[in-house]
Image: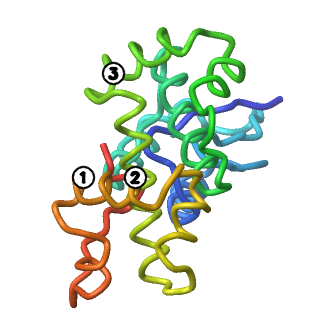
């Protein structure tokens, strides 16, 4: 028998490692773990019910939380889907892809996301893209046009305008800066 926990703010590989350590430290047997979700083996001998409170405390200390309702679970799945899409360079027609993937109109998804997170899906997606751009600039393997192309921007000037609007500096200024100001994915909202 299995029990699946959806975890808020588990959005990167480092998060997966932290959550796994916490679950195992609290005596849970983790069968599988992926972004936002932990599949635990539930045994009759286990004291999982009594360990659940301690688990919740440990997760909160580390910036995570067990999600207990369907709306919050959907919002977390939307975040993970957006992160995966941007990492894979699948940013064209993202609103249509999300609507198909979750079986709800983009408008419904966006309203739920905005109500829960205080920011629209579009703005969250832009924030994710800008953090990805910062990462690609720091790696120094692509020029600005290649970065724009890899993230499906129609033109590099569109990316440049959006980057400056979000960060307050141009891409060149960011590239030449001595201190790069990047947010981790789990800190965007």
> First in sequence: mark 3 or mark 2?
3
> What kind of element bears circle 1?
helix
- Point out which mark residue 189 bears: none
* Residue named by callout 3: 114
Which of marks 1 and 2 precedes in the sequence?
2
Residue tagged 2:
158
Image spot of residue 165 (x, y percent): 22, 52
Q: CA distance from mark 3 to mark 2?
A: 25 Å
Foreground disc of the pair 3, 2: 2
Residue 176 x/y as whole percent: 26, 88
Nearest to N terminus: mark 1 or mark 3: 3
Relative to 148, residue 81 above or below: above
Q: CA distance from mark 2 to mark 1?
A: 12 Å
The residue tagged 1 is 166
Of 136 and 14, which appears nearest the observer?
136
Query: Is residue 84 shown left or right of residue 164?
Result: right
How packed is label 3: few (under 14 Cα within 10 Å), some, or many (20 or more)?
Answer: some
């Amino acid at each position: 028998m299995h029990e699946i926990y959806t975890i808020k703010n588990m959005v990167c590989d480092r998060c997966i490692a932290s959550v796994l350590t916490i679950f195992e430290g609290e005596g849970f047997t983790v069968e599988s773990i992926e972004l936002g979700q932990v599949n635990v083996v539930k045994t009759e001998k286990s004291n999982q019910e009594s360990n659940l409170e301690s688990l919740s405390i440990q997760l909160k200390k580390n910036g995570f939380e067990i999600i207990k309702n369907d709306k919050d679970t959907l919002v977390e799945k939307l975040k993970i889907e957006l992160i995966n899409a941007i990492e894979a360079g699948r940013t064209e027609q993202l609103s249509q892809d999300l609507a198909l993937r979750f079986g709800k109109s983009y408008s419904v998804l966006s309203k739920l996301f905005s109500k829960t997170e205080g920011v629209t899906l579009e703005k969250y997606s832009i924030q994710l893209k800008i953090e990805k751009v910062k990462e690609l600039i720091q790696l120094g393997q692509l020029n600005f046009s290649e970065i724009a192309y890899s993230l499906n921007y129609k033109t590099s000037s569109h990316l440049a305008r959006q980057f400056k609007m979000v960060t307050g500096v141009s891409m060149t200024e960011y590239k030449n800066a001595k201190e790069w100001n990047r947010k981790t994915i789990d800190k965007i909202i």
